[in-house]
Image (cartoon, rainbow, N blue to C red):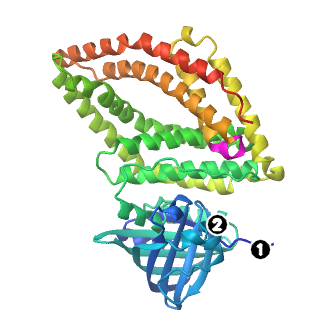
């Protein structure tokens, strides 16, 4: 049986001014420098990107090489062949297997990457590692953007050595873990920078083990956290990046809870607590964004004049600016950088992997057991939904969210039609309960602003409007609960 070629590497973003500090902190080794120029390809519909892959032809000192990479995380598939021109070799087997002959024929050049790479081959913890520092730019049409990356690629040895070396380099320079490939950055340049990075498709293989399933789910959430953290660090107003960062944190915490029978331990508790801290740094910004968008602005654009509404708007915007500054500060902090690296190391090389028999069993069996447990917890929490307190209904919403996240991740291992229905109805329940929670959160938010005078009057008016919709939202939640309970198990 042939073995799929892989590369095992960590990638970090850094500032050009920090390159020398990184080199100085690294162990001594054999140094070199080369100029690299690459052209990246995809179909007009971006089929390769959708499959989590990238195709390039790069001019290297030894000649041109065509490289197809696929996957995210520590290990990625890598298929290389020598080519004679800047056109993809359509006969390359892995490329044809991935796309099919018809799509291969439709590949077109999209952008170019030019970098100066400084390389050091070194030994660390008995592992041979290549340290590469890339500085250059990506060009697409009349647009360009700079890049500066640090890569640690394992040549031989234990992957844990990569994380150990990374921690040493962290002490010398502010390095930020990144899952964004050069292809990802090129697509962002071609198609316009997004305001956020949303949850990617996990794409579990039906034969996957439970441990491998957890790693795939956790990597996807971690990549979303890292990408939205980068957007926040770049500054500017990005409500969606704040939202998607919180969503990613909650997805990862939910996965940790779902897979607790496999991953339990001291490290799990520490990492979950740190993730709770990260989400908390964004809570106030998100609550203010929601209130401004869904309550304040519709009132400001309405026909009824509300005394003090402009004063309230100024107070809300001032509070929102401070809250977003706190979220950006968290994404730029040493604590954030360390958390991402610790999470990645734990996911890929953590002690929880030691002694797992057969990878913790099959992913399909684990999915059925986990979803059954989630459904039982939700049924217990939701009993007598209409009579519950706001806090108790919020706990029902949390259980619905955990069930939905698990069902979305496990969908390839389930009956597809039934899984889609479960996800749809669970999402509807989550949304209906979320509307109730937003009302309760809005009242607490207004109280926290310590308003007075006309702004306080306007806040009271809006609070009354929110309260007037409570009964209707309760009825909507009851309907959503009934619709959810009619859904069959998707296995």
Query: Is 479 displayed left or right of 325 in the figure?
Result: right
On whether residue 262 falls in the magenta region, the answer is no
- The answer to whether residue 28 is visible is no
Tell me where residue 357 appears, x and y as whole percent.
84, 50
Residue 234: % across, % down: 33, 54
Q: In the rendered image, which quarter is residue 161 located in?
A: bottom right
Residue beneath the point at 52% across and 37% down: 276
Q: Which residue is mark 2?
A: 161
Q: Considering depth in this image, is 331 or 196 the residue closer to the camera?
A: 196
Mark 2 to mark 1: distance in Å?
27 Å
Residue 414 is a magenta residue: yes
User: Can you give x and y, in whole percent of width and height, for residue 63 in the image?
Assistant: 52, 90
Q: Is 101 on the left-hand or right-hand side of 49?
A: right
Mark 2 falls on what kind of element?
A: helix
Nearest the camera: 391 or 363?
Answer: 363
| N-term mark: 2 or 1 | 1
Look at the image and give the residue range highlighted in magenta: 409-415
Question: For the residue carrying disc 1, how many other residues have a C-alpha within 10 Å: few (<14), some (14-19), or many (20+)?
Answer: few
Q: Is residue 340 left or right of residue 366?
A: left
Q: Which mark is residue 2?
A: 1
Vertical placement of 203 versus 38: above or below? above
Magenta: main secondary structure: helix
Tell us which disc is closer to us: 2 or 1: 1
Where residue 160 appears, x then y in whole percent? 66, 63
Task: Tell me whether the residue at label 2 lies in contact with that at label 1, contact meaning CB atoms closer than 8 angstroms.
Answer: no
Q: Callout 2: few (<14), some (14-19), or many (20+) C-alpha neighbours within 10 Å?
A: some
In the rendered view of the protein, which quadrant contains the N terminus?
Answer: bottom right
SS of the residue at dot 1? Answer: loop
Q: Residue at x 31, y 14 (%)?
A: 465
In depth, the one of 433 and 324 nearer the eye is 433
């Amino acid at each position: 049986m042939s073995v799929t070629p892989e590369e095992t590497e960590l990638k970090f973003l850094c500032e050009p001014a920090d390159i020398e500090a990184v080199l100085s902190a690294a162990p001594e080794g054999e140094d070199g420098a080369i100029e690299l120029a690459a052209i990246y390809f995809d179909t007009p519909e971006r089929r390769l990107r959708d499959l989590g892959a990238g195709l390039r032809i790069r001019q290297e000192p030894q000649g041109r090489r065509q490289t197809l990479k696929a996957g995210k995380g520590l290990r990625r598939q890598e298929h290389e062949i020598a080519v004679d021109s800047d056109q993809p070799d359509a006969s390359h087997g892995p490329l044809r297997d991935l796309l099919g002959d018809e799509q291969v024929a439709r590949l077109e050049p999209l952008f170019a990457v030019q970098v100066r790479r400084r390389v050091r081959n070194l030994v660390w913890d008995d592992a041979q590692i290549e340290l590469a520092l890339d500085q250059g730019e990506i060009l697409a049409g009349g647009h360009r953007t700079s890049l500066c990356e640090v890569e640690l690629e394992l040549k031989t040895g234990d992957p844990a050595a990569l994380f150990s070396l990374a921690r040493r380099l962290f002490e010398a320079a502010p390095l930020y873990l990144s899952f964004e490939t050069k292809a990802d950055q090129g697509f962002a340049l071609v198609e316009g920078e997004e305001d956020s990075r949303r949850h990617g498709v996990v794409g579990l293989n039906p034969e996957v083990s439970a441990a491998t399933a957890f790693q795939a789910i956790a990597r996807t959430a971690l990549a979303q956290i890292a990408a939205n953290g980068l957007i926040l660090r770049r500054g500017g107003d990005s409500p969606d990046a704040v939202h998607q960062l919180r969503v990613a944190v909650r997805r990862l915490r939910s996965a940790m809870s779902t897979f607790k029978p496999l991953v339990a331990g001291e490290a799990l508790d520490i990492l979950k607590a740190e993730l709770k801290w990260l989400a908390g740094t964004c809570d106030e910004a998100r609550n203010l964004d929601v209130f401004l968008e869904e309550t304040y602005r519709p009132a400001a654009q309405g026909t009824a004049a509300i005394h003090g509404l402009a004063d309230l708007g100024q107070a809300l915007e001032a509070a929102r600016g401070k809250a977003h500054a706190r979220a950006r500060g968290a994404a730029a902090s040493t604590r954030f950088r360390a958390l991402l690296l610790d999470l990645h190391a734990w996911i890929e090389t953590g002690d929880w992997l030691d002694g797992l028999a057969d990878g913790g069993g099959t992913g399909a069996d684990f999915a059925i057991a986990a979803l059954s447990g989630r459904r039982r917890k939700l049924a217990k929490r939701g009993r007598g939904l209409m009579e519950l307190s706001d806090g108790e209904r919020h706990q029902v919403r949390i259980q619905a969210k955990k069930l939905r996240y698990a069902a979305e991740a496990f969908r390839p291992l389930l009956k597809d039609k039934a899984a889609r229905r479960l996800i749809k109805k669970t999402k509807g329940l989550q949304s209906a309960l979320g509307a109730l929670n937003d009302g309760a959160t809005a009242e607490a938010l207004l109280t926290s602003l310590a308003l007075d005078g006309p702004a306080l009057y306007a806040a009271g008016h809006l609070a009354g409007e929110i309260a007037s919709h409570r009964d209707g939202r309760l009825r909507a939640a009851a309907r959503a609960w009934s619709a959810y309970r009619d859904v069959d198990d998707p296995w």
